[in-house]
Amino acid sequence: MSSAITTAVPSVELPDTPRRIRALRISDVLSLTGAVVASISMTSIIYTYLAPVGGVVGFFATAYVLFLAAYALLVSFDENMTTVRDRMVLVGVHSLAVTVFVTLIFVVVFALVRGADALPHLNFFTQDMALAGPLDPLTDGGIIHAITGTLIQITIALSITIPLGLTTAVFLNEIPGAFTRFVRTIVEAMTALPSIVAGLFIYATAILIFGLNKSGLAAALAISVMMLPIMIRAADVVLRLVPSTLKEASLGLGANNWNTMWRVTLPTARSGLVTAVILATARGIGETSPVLLTSGFTAAFNADPLHGPMVSLPLAIFQFVKSPEPTMIARGFGTAAVLMIIVVSLFIVARIIGGQTVAKKVNARAKREQWVKDIREIGNAIASPFTRFNRTIRRIIYTIRSRFRSKGNKR
Amino acid sequence: MDVVTEEKPRSLKMVSDKEDRVYRGVARAGGITVLVIMTAIGVFLGFRAAEALAQAGPEFFLTQAWEPDANNFGIAAVLVGTFIIALVAVTIALPLSLGTSLYISEYAPKNIKPTLIALVDLMAAIPSVVFGLWGFFSLQGNIIDIAKWISRTFGWIPIFAVDGFTDDPLSSDTVFTASSFVAGIVVALMITPIMTSIMREVFSQAPVGEREGALGLGATMWGMIRSVVLPFGKGGIIGGTMLGLGRALGETIAVYMIISPIFSIQTHILQAGASSISSLIALKYGEATTFGMSALMAAGLALFFVTLVINFGASAIVSRSRSGASS
């Protein structure tokens, strides 16, 4: 059993990574703490007596500049200039990274916190806004129309982009040539296509030329134009990671190109492809501007993508916060929270699926088997006193019974 | 006796069967379809825009006002406005993303690195409208003090000047809201993730041998970064910044929610009133007549070409800076 497990786990060769060199001395900690204390005290004094800037942001900005100066001074006491410069960069890089992560997380948390007013009301998820006016409390009206609209539009968009996007990604990988390179360049340039231009394009073609009304279908087409390059690029990268030895083995065994693609390349890249699709979905769900031009706006429930305007979550947010009424703004933030939750959960699902490699799967199975074995052993260990006790009792009963029986036989 | 046989690879000829021919045909058709769609964007926008462009002529690029029905319209103001917002955004996003990507690739502890990378990718997927909400309801109120301070200290530089601002504490703050500066900060946060992920990818490919060599010769961490990582990643920094610029130019909803539109060239970035092509389209499409729509299409076409040129340049630079098969 155990030998089978050890053979199943491939010995993962560590890639050639640089060794991390790190040492922390007491003087480093002391100079850092000293600089922090000095800068906060100086800033407090400046703010109390001199006050060149007001506000919280100004306080932190001043404190930060003073901190840099104090830290440079403290380090220069016992290090040379090269080290001082190194420390300055270290502090700078860390604070830039912290700024970015804290701000981006704050953007998300801000939407969730402000949305908390609207979310506890169940009607927010079951009603539309057809009968609820701007002055109605949060206990009236909801965003079921926007949720449905988003689901319908993204379904249509996916049913267009998945086949077309994956076929194109396969084309880019399997049929080399000058034309392929050209298509790849175009697709790459299109990943940053301004989303409003995608909306204008569908407006110019589907609505003005083919006479389609502003509807869910037109919005879905606009989202498709947005999502297509993103999906092709992500899938292209994933397909390129499939080891060519696998493909060559398949071709060498006599399979043709189609069978190699269908039975070897695509299954190998499956988890990566799913991730590509989910990431493109997350981007498509959040797009506002293509939908703005193509779907029209309605406050009523509409599940028919062909007729009548159909609103989606981002568009609903946009319309809600245009209103000056606090309840409408609260609804806007509630909708934003719902949208954020959908995007983040899509992203987490994509991560989980995309993180599955063959080695990881094997490792996970080995771990699971080991775990089952451990459980069984623990169970045995717990059960053994009982078993022994049971066995003893049974033996006693047996002896007593046989003695009685022999007595009876004697009689 | 030895016969010299020249070793040459046998020339291989592939005979594809019917299945393969169908498969190749379908794949090629997929590629062609995508190409057609992408070309159609330019063609149809051009087709729709032709009417307005013919009417306006070269004045289209010189006029600041936007009154298509009075036949007085052009993209001079909005194009300049678009670039001002994008440049503010890139100026802020460049140090942020440079620092973040250096942190992730060089300084971050190994065990939190994958989490940080995933976080950056997640941030790239945050909907634009959520950034707009944050910018309008949170950032705008908090940034006024900074804007005031910049204007008071550096007001002698023309772009930081603000008309109608006096040091009177009772004067209204509204002159500092809805400006290119605020919109630029929001857009900066939106483009930071994509710039960070490109720079990090290029930095992480810096050769290990040269890094260790620099450290072995006694370089500090910064010395190693300056002499190995940054020169190696130069293309990635430039290309990533250009990609970020391309994104920033096309950003619509967040900008639209923050700025108060103005149709004259406004170079005072701290002052209320800004403009961009995409927010012009979002603002005017509802009330546009047929001719007005054609004019909007022309503006969209201009935006399309500008972003296309920048993206082509960016992807060329990025792919040249990466080794081997570029992605």
Image: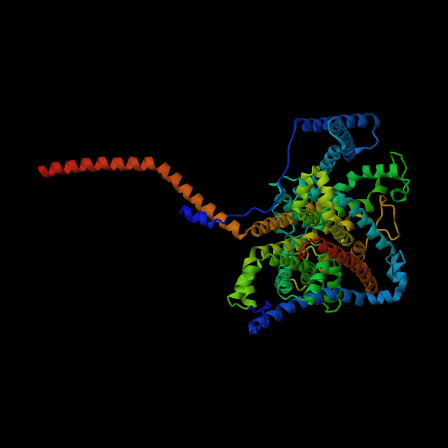
**A341 w.r.t. A197: above or below:** above
- Percent x, y of residue A169: 63, 62
Nearest the viewer among A76 and B140 is: A76
Q: Is residue A69 left or right of residue B66?
A: left
Q: Residue A92 is drawn in which quadrant?
A: top right
Answer with left or right where residue B305 lies relative to residue A149: right
Q: Residue at x 72, y 62 (%)?
A: A186
- Residue sitting nearer the eye, A68 or A341: A68
Q: Position of residue B191 (x, y in %)?
A: 73, 49
Please, is residue A204 above or below residue A384 in the view? below
Rendering colour mode: rainbow
The N terminus of chain B sits in image quarter: bottom right
Q: Position of residue A112 (x, y in %)?
A: 66, 43
Furthest toward the front, the residue is B1
Residue A105 appears in the figure: no
- Looking at the picture, how far across and down is residue A182, in whole percent? 71, 64
> Taking the image as drawn, is residue B31 in sight?
yes
Could you tell whether B108 is left or right of B299 in the image? left
| Residue at (90, 37) in percent of width and height | B166
Residue at position x 53%, y 64% from top?
A250
Q: Nearer the viewer, residue A361 or A115?
A: A361
Q: Which residue is at the front of the view, A377 or A251?
A: A251
The picture quadrant where one finds residue A376 is top left
Quadrant, the C terminus of chain B: bottom right
How many marks overall? 0
